[in-house]
Image: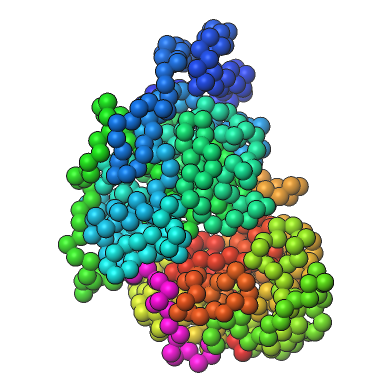
């Protein structure tokens, strides 16, 4: 049940322009709401009286009711209990302007302002922690695959293990060492919903979430016009690069912690354009998330900014908090006997059912059959400590060889050995702490001229009779999902894998690290090491991009919406056919943007740390940025990393060989 009232009011249209609000009226209503939230009843009344004749009868009715109730306690009403150890704050209902003003910096097109009325509800003071989530998993008897059966949704994965999150050890779920009070991560929407149902609560609606975040404010952030490192855990100059304990920063004025940053928070709603009440959006493909996270820049932590992902999506920056409807004078603290979740009879695999167990660090073993693949370290390279007196080192060798070869129809360019400085100087704009410069010697190798296409990947799948689930046995790793069907990628039709219509020459997307690896094995190649990738991308350049200091729309497919002077309102944010832009100096296409590219390496913050599959963090490196990455994330030195079974519309790869 939604706590949001079904009354959502829109003000009168502009007389001749057809806009949703006359902006002066909208500003006045926003001010009334701000006065009401702070208990300034007289000022709210005076502002209302000045504009009441310009409002509809429905508008006046709602505002007058809110003024009548002005002065009530909002979020510090005494709460007689909690929900399974989760402290809940009562949020007094009210009226507010949802979305962002057209003049707000970094405003997105899906943030159209509209006036909304919210009923009283409860919201958890903090994000749900690893400790609290483990209590739920163990109480429900969830086993190591993290799965539970829903009456409405079937069998779904709730959560995946992570070194910052939770682990399954000795048949029990436990917070990762020292992470009990950090927010749960790697949780799907299903996992967030299941916890809330068990605890007798629910996920907040998107409208409730923004209302609570704003806490009466009308500025981009509930702390004002800008967000500082002292306010929240987000991607700033301090480079915290991790979740932090919940409640690590001061709460907003209603007593709620971490509404900006730390982790993105799932909401109950389907994502769509605001209609009236977002709860009226009854179907969709993606669910809404709010608040930004530890790896979001400030603009993506604004009160009005909206994210959306599939409900089975998970990541190391996604968590949630819990809401509860006001049904009596107290919170029901007993677990709900839910109708929509049923315990699985067993978590064993049926003969016709394959369940992919989340990969943990101790499940990694070197592949036994691929003789072309060397251990996933910095690889076939000699690492030396960089001379601290030098901020950059010019590449002193490395001349691309004119010779080339083909692997299963993929054109390969020979890259000659050479010495280069890997990483970026601290003075480079957008430099990150895991890009500390070191000098590397790279041996001769081949690299595919272009990213692997949908057409080429379908050839591999069909040659190996890969089933419609995209699953295959991977030597050393068990049965794994290689690829997920996507409208920009590939489809399974009539027992055959085919590129989506018109997407033959587009880069394969939705592919996991396993899917990239087994393609390379089949073709007689391998994934490039991280050092090889950056060496080939730079092509003897030492600037942030192989094109120079800046990246322009004529040079690569990336998201320019947040780059001053480059915005193209008509640009499509999606992949493009491989080779749509000029190659770098060594003849390699799309090394910046289009899709992130998997590398062979396990991720370590320092390049020269030992990478042992049995002990290293179970995440693989990706390079190059994607079509939806801002320019700073497409730099030659930029690194990202995720678990090997992760997939997304912005992830692909290219093939290397010795």
Query: Is residue 452 in view?
Result: no
Q: Is residue 145 above or below residue 207?
A: below
Query: Is residue 550 in view?
Result: yes
Quadrant assignment for the C terminus: bottom right
Q: Is residue 268 above or below residue 648?
A: above
Residue 368 colored in magenta in the image: yes
Residue 357 colored in magenta in the image: yes
Residue stretch in magenta: 356-373
Percent of width and height locating residue 485: 43, 65
The residue depicted at 55 percent of the width and 66 percent of the height is 641
Q: Is residue 607 above or below residue 371?
A: above
The residue depicted at 56 percent of the width and 8 percent of the height is 46
Is 210 displayed left or right of 241 in the figure? Answer: left
How many numbered dots are placed on residues in this image?
0
Instruction: Identify the residue at the far bottom of this view.
Output: 371
Percent of width and height locating residue 568: 69, 48
Instruction: Pick the residue in front: 66 or 580.
Output: 66
Instruction: Identify the residue at the far front of this view.
Output: 178
Q: Is residue 265 above or below residue 507?
A: above
Instruction: Identify the residue at the far left of this view.
Output: 345
The residue depicted at 41 percent of the width and 14 percent of the height is 69
Instruction: Pick the residue in front: 333 or 464.
Output: 333
Is 508 displayed left or right of 428 in the figure? Answer: left
Instruction: Pick the residue in front: 302 or 328.
Output: 328
Is 150 displayed left or right of 532 in the figure? Answer: left
The residue depicted at 70 percent of the width and 57 percent of the height is 430
Percent of width and height locating residue 232: 57, 44
Magenta stretch, main secondary structure class? loop
Percent of width and height locating residue 229: 63, 46
């Amino acid at each position: 049940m939604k706590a949001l009232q079904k009354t959502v009011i829109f003000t009168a249209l502009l007389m001749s322009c057809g806009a949703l609000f006359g902006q002066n009226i909208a500003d006045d209503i926003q001010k009334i709401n701000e006065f009401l939230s702070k208990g300034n009843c007289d000022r709210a009344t005076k502002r209302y009286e000045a504009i009441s004749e310009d409002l509809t009868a429905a508008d006046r009715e709602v505002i007058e009711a809110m003024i009548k109730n002005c002065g009530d306690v909002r979020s510090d009403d005494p709460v007689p209990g909690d929900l399974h150890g989760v402290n809940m704050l009562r949020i007094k209902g009210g009226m507010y302007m949802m979305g962002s003003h057209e003049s707000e910096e970094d405003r997105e097109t899906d943030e159209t302002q509209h006036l909304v009325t919210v009923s009283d509800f409860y919201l958890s003071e903090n994000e749900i922690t690893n400790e609290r989530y483990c209590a739920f998993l163990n109480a429900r008897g969830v086993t190591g695959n993290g799965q539970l059966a829903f009456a409405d949704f079937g069998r779904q994965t709730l959560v995946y293990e992570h070194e910052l999150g939770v682990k399954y050890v000795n048949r029990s779920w436990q917070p990762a060492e020292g992470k009990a009070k950090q927010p749960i991560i790697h949780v799907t929407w299903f996992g967030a919903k299941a916890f809330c149902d068990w605890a007798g609560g629910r996920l907040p609606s998107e409208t409730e979430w923004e209302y609570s975040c704003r806490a009466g404010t009308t500025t981009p952030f509930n702390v004002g016009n800008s967000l500082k490192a002292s306010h929240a855990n987000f991607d700033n100059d301090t480079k915290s690069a991790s979740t932090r304990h919940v409640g690590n920063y001061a709460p907003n004025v209603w007593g709620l912690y971490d509404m900006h940053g730390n982790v993105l928070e799932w909401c109950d709603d389907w994502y769509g354009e605001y209609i009236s009440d977002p709860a009226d959006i009854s179907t969709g493909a993606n669910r809404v998330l709010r608040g930004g996270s530890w790896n979001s820049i400030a603009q993506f932590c604004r009160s009005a900014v909206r994210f959306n992902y599939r409900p089975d999506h998970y990541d190391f920056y996604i968590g949630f908090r819990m809401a509860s409807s006001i049904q009596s004078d107290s919170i029901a603290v007993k677990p709900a006997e839910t109708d929509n979740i049923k315990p699985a009879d067993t978590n064993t695999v049926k003969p016709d059912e394959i369940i992919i167990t989340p990969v943990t660090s101790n499940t990694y073993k070197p592949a036994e059959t691929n003789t072309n693949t060397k251990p996933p370290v910095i690889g076939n390279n000699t690492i030396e400590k960089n001379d601290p007196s030098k901020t950059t080192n010019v590449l002193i060798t490395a001349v691309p060889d004119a010779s080339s070869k083909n692997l299963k129809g993929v054109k390969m360019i020979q890259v000659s050995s050479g010495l280069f400085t890997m990483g970026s100087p601290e003075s480079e704009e957008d430099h990150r702490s895991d890009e500390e410069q070191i000098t590397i010697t790279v041996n001769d190798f081949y690299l595919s001229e272009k990213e692997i296409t949908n057409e080429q990947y379908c050839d591999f799948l069909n040659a190996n009779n890969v089933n419609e689930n995209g699953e295959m046995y991977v030597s050393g790793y068990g049965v794994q999902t290689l690829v997920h069907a996507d409208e920009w990628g590939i489809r399974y039709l009539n027992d055959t894998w085919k590129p989506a219509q018109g997407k033959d020459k587009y880069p394969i997307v939705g592919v996991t690290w396993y899917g990239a690896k087994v393609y390379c094995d089949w073709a007689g190649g391998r994934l490039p090491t991280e050092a090889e990738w950056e060496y080939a991308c730079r092509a003897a350049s030492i600037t942030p991009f192989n094109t120079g200091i800046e990246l322009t729309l004529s040079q690569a497919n990336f998201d320019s919406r947040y780059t001053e002077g480059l915005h193209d309102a008509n640009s499509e944010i999606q992949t493009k056919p491989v080779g749509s832009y000029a190659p770098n100096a060594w003849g390699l296409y799309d090394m910046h943007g289009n899709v992130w590219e998997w590398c062979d390496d396990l991720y370590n913050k320092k390049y020269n740390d030992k990478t042992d599959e049995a002990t290293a963090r179970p995440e693989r490196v990706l390079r190059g940025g994607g079509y939806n990455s801002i320019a700073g994330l497409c730099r030659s030195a930029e690194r990202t990393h995720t678990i090997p079974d992760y997939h997304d519309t912005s992830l692909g790869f290219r093939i290397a060989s010795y």
